[in-house]
Amino acid sequence: MKVVLLAGGFGTRLAEYTDVVPKPMVRIGQYPILLHIMRHYAAYEYKDFLIALGYKGEVIKEYFLNYYSLNADFTVNLGSGDVTHHNTLSLDWNVTLVDTGADSMTGGRVGRMRDYVDNERFLLTYGDGLSDVNIDSLLDFHRSHGKLVTVTAVRPAARFGDLSLEDSRVASFSEKPRMKEGWINGGFFVMEPEFLDFISNDATILEKEPLELAAQKGELMAYRHEGFWQCMDTKRDHDHLSEMWDGGNAPWVPGI
């Protein structure tokens, strides 16, 4: 089963980094966040990736073309041009890089993947969100209901402390609690190929007409994920994820 990763947005709210690289290439530790996401899927044996490129897509192309040179020591024979890599961790992944247009919207990028998903069920997520969602359980849920789309619903931590008030008295205080209500779109979709018919053109926003139409038709189901989920929208988000990684507390990596 193929995994589609949306990696073409401008990332304007993370301009401290995205003036130089596209948002999915902003690093958490030594790896771009895109690679963290891919490693999560690969842990569940989903290793056939389709990356939808847009803004600064050439940076992502160059990264994967030179993956082993960028992530290992190597020796170059300047006479023959031969390169020998040392201490490499070989990856048995298949990565297809697809230019989906600099100005395409999220739905347009998904629509351009039609020829690559081979009319089969596929996985889809954004290139800027990390989670410990169990992909096998997500797929089991999707198979159980037989609808066109499953979206992973999450309840992220609130950005500010929660006060429970009784008149002017603080009855309870919780610093950055998980949201009690308000499930949101956490990405990590499962989609049937027929859903692509809901996408009109490059200007289509995935989260508007296609998913709204799927919901109206009763073809959109939510897999509730109570575990870890964190997007990287701002520098604050990036710093938080980096601190987790540097501290050895990276729940999006299976086994940690």
Image (tube, grey):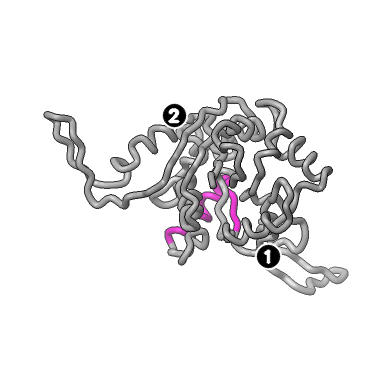
Chain-order first, disc 2 or disc 1: 2
Look at mark 1 in the image and give the residue it sits on.
177
* Mark number, residue 153: none
The residue at 50%/31% (across/down) is 98
* Number of disc labels: 2
Left or right: 215 in relation to 150: right
The residue at 51%/37% (across/down) is 51
The percent coordinates of residue 127 (x first, y second) are: 55, 43
> Under tag 1, what secondary structure?
loop
* Mark number, residue 58: 2
Q: Is residue 127 above or below residue 80?
A: below
User: Please, what is the three-letter code of the amino acid marked with disc 2?
Assistant: Glu
Q: Nearer the viewer, residue 211 or 72?
A: 211
Q: Is residue 222 above or below residue 208?
A: below
Q: CA distance from mark 2 to mark 1?
A: 40 Å
The residue at 20%/42% (across/down) is 84
The residue at 66%/61% (across/down) is 225
Q: Can residue 157 be seen here?
A: no
| Dominant secondary structure, magenta | helix
User: Please, what is the three-letter code of the amino acid marked with disc 1?
Assistant: Pro
Q: Residue furthest front?
A: 119
Magenta span? 229-246
